[in-house]
Image (spheres, grey):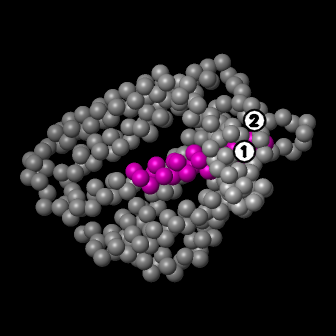
C-alpha cells in the first residue's frame, strides 16, 4: 500500500523534491571530485599503477609461478612510455579523472538519494527486496571495477602496449588513450557484473525462468567466451579464462537469483 503523502503530493512537489535530490547529488560529486583533484599524486599513482611491470597483479603471478614451478606464468619486465601531444590534455585529464573518481566514490550516496526519491511510490512488497537489490548492485558493480583494475586492464595494456609489428616501431601510448580506455573498461565491467540484478528484474516480470537459463547454458558459455575475447584481446588462454570465469559464475548466480525471484512476480 502506498503512503498517503504520495497521493497528496502534486506534480510540482515532486519536481521540487527531485530538484533538491539532484542538487545534493551534484554537491556530493563536486566535493569529492575536488578532493580527488587536490590529491593528484595519490590519484594518478592509482591510475598509472597498472601500466608498470611491478604492479601487484604481475607480482602475484610471479609468486604463483614460483609456488607451482611455472616460470612462464611470471611476466617479463616491460616499460611503456606515456606521452602527451596536446597543450591542455594533461589538465583536462586531471579534471576528467577527478570527476570520475568523485562520481565513483559518491555513487552509494547518489543511489541512496535516488532511492529515497522513488521509495514513496513503491508498493510494500517492492520495498521489502529493494534494499537488498541496491546493496547487491553496489557490491557487484565495485567487484566488476576491481576485476578490471587488477586483471583485465593491466593484462590487456601489457599485451597491446608491448605488441610490435616491427622493432622499428616504438610504442608510446597517448595519455588520453590510456585514461579513456581505463575508464571505459571500468564502467563496462561494472555494468557486466550487474547481470544477476537484471536477471532478478526479468524474473520478477516473468520474462525469464530458471529452466530457460539452464537450457541455454551452452549457448551462454559461447557468448561469454566471445565477450571475454573482445574485452581482453590478449593472445594467451590464461587471461581469457580469468575474464570468462567470473562472467560464467555470474551466469550461474543469475540462475540462483531467478529461481528465488520467480516465485512472485510484480503485479
| Picture residue at 61% right of the left edge, 23% below the top | 90
Q: Quadrant of residue 113?
A: top left
In the foreground, 194 or 118:
194
Q: Position of residue 146 (x, y in %)?
A: 52, 48
The answer to whether residue 132 is seen in the rendering is: yes
**149 within the magenta span:** yes
Check disc 1: other Cα within 10 Å, few if <14, some if 14-19, many if 20+.
many
Residue at x-position 33% and y-position 71%? 261
Counting residues from the start of the chain, the first of labels 2 and 1 encountered is 2
Q: Is residue 86 above or below residue 218?
A: above
Q: Residue at the location (77% across, 41% down)?
A: 77
Q: Which residues are magenta?
A: 138-162
* SS class, disc 2: loop
Place of residue 241 in the rendered image (x, y in percent of width and height, measured from the top left): 65, 62
Task: Quickly name the residue at label 1.
Answer: 158
Where is residue 81? Give x, y as percent: 74, 31
Amino acid at each position: 500500500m502506498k503512503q498517503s503523502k504520495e497521493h497528496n503530493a502534486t506534480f510540482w512537489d515532486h519536481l521540487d523534491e527531485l530538484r533538491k535530490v539532484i542538487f545534493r547529488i551534484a554537491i556530493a560529486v563536486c566535493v569529492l571530485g575536488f578532493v580527488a583533484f587536490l590529491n593528484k599524486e595519490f590519484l594518478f599513482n592509482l591510475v598509472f599503477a597498472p601500466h608498470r611491470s611491478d604492479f601487484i597483479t604481475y607480482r602475484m603471478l610471479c609468486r604463483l609461478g614460483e609456488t607451482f614451478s611455472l616460470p612462464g606464468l611470471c611476466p617479463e619486465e616491460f616499460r611503456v612510455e606515456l606521452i602527451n601531444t596536446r597543450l591542455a590534455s594533461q589538465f583536462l585529464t586531471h579534471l576528467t579523472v577527478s570527476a570520475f573518481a568523485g562520481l565513483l566514490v559518491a555513487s552509494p550516496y547518489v543511489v541512496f538519494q535516488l532511492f529515497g526519491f522513488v521509495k514513496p511510490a513503491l508498493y510494500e512488497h517492492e520495498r521489502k527486496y529493494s534494499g537488498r537489490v541496491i546493496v547487491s548492485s553496489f557490491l557487484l558493480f565495485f567487484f566488476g571495477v576491481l576485476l578490471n583494475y587488477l586483471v583485465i586492464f593491466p593484462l590487456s595494456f601489457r599485451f597491446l602496449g608491448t605488441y610490435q609489428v616491427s622493432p622499428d616501431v616504438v610504442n608510446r601510448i597517448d595519455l588520453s588513450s590510456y585514461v579513456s580506455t581505463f575508464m571505459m573498461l571500468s564502467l563496462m565491467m561494472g555494468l557486466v557484473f550487474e547481470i544477476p540484478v537484471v536477471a532478478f528484474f526479468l524474473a520478477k516480470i516473468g520474462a525469464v525462468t530458471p529452466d530457460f537459463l539452464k537450457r541455454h547454458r551452452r549457448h551462454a558459455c559461447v557468448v561469454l567466451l566471445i565477450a571475454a575475447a573482445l574485452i581482453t584481446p590478449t593472445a594467451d588462454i590464461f587471461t581469457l579464462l580469468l575474464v570468462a570465469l567470473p562472467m560464467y559464475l555470474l551466469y550461474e548466480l543469475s540462475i540462483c537469483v531467478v529461481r528465488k525471484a520467480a516465485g512472485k512476480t510484480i503485479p
